[in-house]
Amino acid sequence: NTNNDNDNNDNFDITTYQQARQILRPFEEEEEQQQQQKHDDDMNDENDDDDKPFLWGNLSVGPVWKSRLIQAGYSRPTPIQSQTFTTVLHNKSTKRQNYVLAAPTGSGKSLAYLLPFLTTMDVSSMSSSLSSKSKSKNNHHQEATTTGTVWIVTPTMELACQLQRVVHRLIPPCNPNSSGLFHVLKSGSTTTTTTTSSARKEIDDASTTIDPFPLLSQLMDATTDSNDRSPLFLAGTPKVFLQLRKEIKKAVAYHPRSKNSNINHDDKKYHHLAMSLRRNLQTVVLDEADRLLQTNVIQGPSVTSDTTSTSATKKKKKTTPSQRPKKPTIPMAQELLKSLVLESSSFHQTFSKSYSSSKNHRQPTTNTGSLQILCASATVGRSLRRRLMEILQTPSIDKAAGLITADVRRTKKNVQDRKLSLLPERLRHGYKLAVDEMVDDDSTNNTVDEQDTAASLLSGLDEALQKLDPQPSLIFPGPVGVEKTMEFLIHAGFQDVRGLSSLMKSDMQDDTSPASETNDEMDWKSTPMFVVKERLGRGLDLPQVRYVFLLGVPSNAASYAHLAGRTARHDQTGTAITIFRPQETPKLCSVAE
């Protein structure tokens, strides 16, 4: 609201919003100064600990990992990383417990749940000084003890590839074409790339059957690489992991000691690998857990309670699939989690009995306890822990999973305090009203043609860019679409327009490098502009991005938090600007509230 009653402008622009923010943010600036003072004090404490090579900030990671973290660009741990490291490692030696990591976007949650597993690895196994002969002898032992210890479930494949690059920055693979310590499972039923041309011809000549174990074949290639260690982390979408679980179940059914002539040598190798994956699995990580475990309710047409009338109408007229009411579907991540929990408990009971009764084998010391579940997201709460309580069938949410957060406001009962902890503190919010150019006053409905909607939103984007200084930007096109938005930017003269495919192929250092300090010499024509779909935006880490443009209002506040949180990451400043039409004003107010 404005105190000037004479000002009746209907066009809300960014300048008026910034003026309002200057009035409403004096107490926030004071809080930022206090946090900056705290940051300076922490830096002074870090300088005092330079003579302690085993300390990375306040975490005892050892001299090797301290050097690797600093070389990778992580000068000090973030609050959520410190809290997660101390909490997980404290209970790791006694009994693995489930945890939910809650922290704002850009706070380093990925490294927070990766670090406890990385730092507890055998440091000698990371070096490449072993000869290929000694590695070949111990290859089966490495495979049986390390492959697939941690499964990381992500909503998109792009997020899984991003996590792989984070691990590769800390532990680069020996072979550039190898997945190294972190393997991303890629769906598909084609033969592996390592198959020779002669072998492919033999397969094509023999039959046209497809490889029954495409994912196990990928892992087989990764574990048999003599120049690298077997992958400790496996990452992928829930759909890929469900496929992997089916392959494991099928491969376990092959008995290598059987005299059946139909079982070949490859089937035996798949059997050993599948048994190793079952035995090694210790932890399942759900990145962006609130999206993975949400119930996708598909609403159908209203159905009357009179069953006789509905049956009569079915006889008279057949309903199309789109007209039939659909039941709520169970998320694939929930289905995967339930199956893994049941299989883990039953497998280890059987496995422990078989090893204890055998005289020639010792009972293994790895993964004899229950399966650990770690969930991470910026928008999590008691609802997620209740869902875990239902899946794990625990008596309370505290028994299901503990809460790890570095912000005490997350644990407050005050709803406003919890809202303030969802977004980065250096994130600013703006909006731009996009007025429809062609509106029929005589029309009774308020619907606007899709072309008019795209034109008005793109026009609002153009006006917003003209009022801002050139900075790397990320655009979520919304109803406009990626192709139309990229075509608009290219026709407008932008020379560096990037899609998600080029973003995933680019080098990690280029993607995570901070914004250039010579922005005075930069213009919008040469400024990087990223255009990504909303459903693929979660978890993307682009620290150089200073502006996030939302073409249209997101569906809810949680979606806005994740999309706007692609900027103002790693203690940097950023602005999220929503381009909206007049019809979306109530929706924008609801999200803002």
Image (cartoon, rainbow, N blue to C red):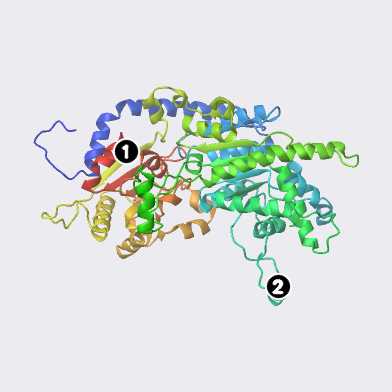
Left or right of residue 481: residue 100: right
Q: Residue at x 58, y 53 (%)?
A: 240
The label shown at residue 203 is 2
Q: Is residue 117 positioned above or below 470 on the image?
A: above
Q: How many C-alpha atoms fall within 10 Å of the one at disc 1: few (<14), some, or many (≥20)?
A: some
Question: Nearest the camera: 362 or 259?
Answer: 259
Q: Residue at x 45, y 27 (%)?
A: 410
The amino acid type of the residue labelled 2 equals Ile
Q: Residue at x 68, y 30 (%)?
A: 92
Left or right of residue 220: residue 577: left
Q: Residue at x 41, y 54 (%)?
A: 533
Residue that label 1 marks: 591
Q: How many C-alpha atoms fall within 10 Å of the one at disc 2: few (<14), some, or many (≥20)?
A: some
Image coordinates for residue 454, horizontal then vertical, percent:
27, 57
Of tags 2 and 1, which is closer to the observer? 2
Image coordinates for residue 524, horizontal then vertical, percent:
33, 56
Q: Going from the N terminus, do you reach mark 2 or mark 1 first? A: 2
Left or right of residue 593: residue 272: right
In which quadrant of the rendered image does the C terminus lie?
top left
Residue 108 visible in the current orientation: no
